[in-house]
Amino acid sequence: MPSDDEVVQTAAEAAEGVIFARFKQSAVKDFDVTVTFEDGILDVDVYLNVPDARDEEDQVAEDAALAARSAVDDLFAETDG
């Protein structure tokens, strides 16, 4: 069973990976990935501010949150199997 810290770190890294795969770091004015894992419940919130890509911000933030959840699912699958 992964530790709570490992779950949070895995989710945050996955979310950041999606953000910076889609946007150059210099294009991102601000971002915040907030991950909590308490009592077996994962909560991921992604805020993204990319002035030149306002149309894409919401979709990339959603994709980043989904990637975070998927990475945590994979983490638990690795430890269960």
Image (cartoon, rainbow, N blue to C red):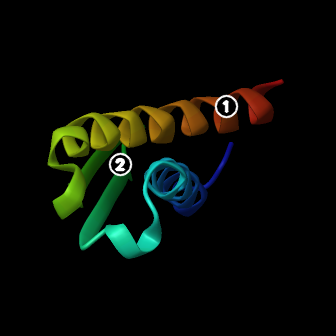
* Residue picked out by circle 2: 38
Query: Would you place residue 24 above or below residue 71 in this image?
Result: below
Q: Position of residue 6 (x, y in %)?
A: 60, 58
* Residue picked out by circle 1: 74
- Residue drawn at (66%, 48%) of the image: 2
- Residue drawn at (55%, 58%) of the image: 13
Asked which secondary structure carries label 2, the reply is strand
Q: Position of residue 33 (x, y in %)?
A: 33, 60
Query: Would you place residue 59 above or below residue 12 in this image?
Result: above
Amino acid on which the number 1 mark rests in the picture? Asp
Q: Which mark is residue 57?
A: none
* Residue placed most toward the observer, 41 or 58: 58
Separation of disc 1 and disc 2 at Cα? 18 Å
In which quadrant of the rendered view does residue 17 lie?
bottom right
Q: Position of residue 1 (x, y in %)?
A: 68, 42
Give the mark nearer the N terminus: 1 vs 2.
2
Amino acid on which the number 2 mark rests in the picture? Glu
- Residue drawn at (38%, 34%) of the image: 63
On the rendered structure, is 37 left or right of 75?
Answer: left
Q: Residues within 10 Å of mark 1 (few under 14, many from 20)?
A: few
